[in-house]
Amino acid sequence: MFENKKLTPEQEVALKQAVGANVKAVENLLGRMPSFREYINHVFENLKVDREAFKPNFNGFMQGWQLNDFPKDDYLSIYNDMFDPTRESIEETISLFSQIFEQDDLIEKGNDEMKQIESKKKIEGIGGLFKKLSRINLFKLSSDEIIILSIITGTTFALVLGYIFGETQYFDGYGNRVSEYYSGFGQTTEHKFNFILGIASFIITAGIMYLFLNRKNKNDDK
């Protein structure tokens, strides 16, 4: 940060004279020899420029000060006080966080949309299955056969829907539950069966199947 630039002899003379004249003007203003801190602050205030625009010129004024053999100062401390590099680092970190969170939001939004599309396709497929069943010309069944077939149908739908709409849970290597985007040590997954949906779908599908077959048998008897 504070390495002096390699200058030609002519450039060194010009820089030495320019900074020397500046320092002399500040000395006349203060009535005494200024420190480098006082000098650089005076220059900055008189230039009336943004700190970021002035930052690249700091080394030049420091180098001119040193070429004149003026008293040494704590240049690093002066630079940090003027430009606060920790603030710059914090702003860069915040900017990085914003980019990461924006990417995560886009990924999560895309995943949610894909899940909605998949769920819609599954529901449409189940609806199509009911339509196909309604077109089947079954043989006449006894009451026991109707009950058994209704239970089998209800159980099948309960297992399928309970699994499809179950919840996948994610855990780290210590058994703590984490988000699906966690990529740390020893991630494992566990799929939780949706018992509420499973039981509800069993009751509904078994009941619909039972009523459907009963009504079909009665119509066939007529």
Image (cartoon, helix red, strand yellow):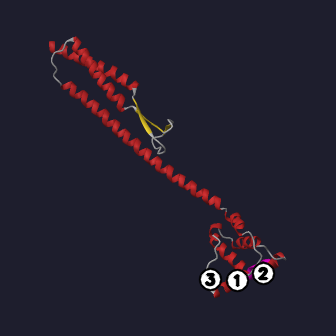
Numbered range of the magenta stretch: 20-26
C-beta proximity under 8 Å, tags 1 and 3: no
Q: Residue at x 33, y 36 (%)?
A: 120
The answer to which of marks 1 and 3 sits earlier in the sequence is 3
C-beta proximity under 8 Å, tags 2 and 3: no
- The residue beneath circle 3 is 7
Examine the image and state in which quarter residue 20 appears. Answer: bottom right
| Number of other residues with Cα within 10 Å of mark 2, as a class: few under 14, some 14 to 19, many 20 or more | some
| Number of other residues with Cα within 10 Å of mark 1, as a class: few under 14, some 14 to 19, many 20 or more | many
Nearest the viewer among 169 and 155 is 169
Mark-to-mark CA distance, 2 and 3: 23 Å
> Which mark lies nearer to you, 1 or 3?
3
Q: Residue at x 36, y 25 (%)?
A: 198
- The residue beneath circle 2 is 24
What amino acid does circle 2 point to?
Answer: Lys
Q: 129 above or below 40?
A: above
| Image location (x, y in percent) of residue 130 | 25, 27
Secondary element type, mark 3:
loop
> Which mark lies nearer to you, 1 or 2?
1
| Image location (x, y in percent) of residue 204 | 33, 21
> Which mark lies nearer to you, 2 or 3?
3
What amino acid does circle 3 point to?
Answer: Leu
For the view shown, which residue lies furthest in the bottom direction?
10
> What secondary structure predominates along the stretch shown in magenta?
helix
Residue 118 can be seen, yes or no = yes
Q: Residue at x 53, y 52 (%)?
A: 98
- Where the N terminus falls, by quadrant? bottom right
- The residue beneath circle 1 is 16
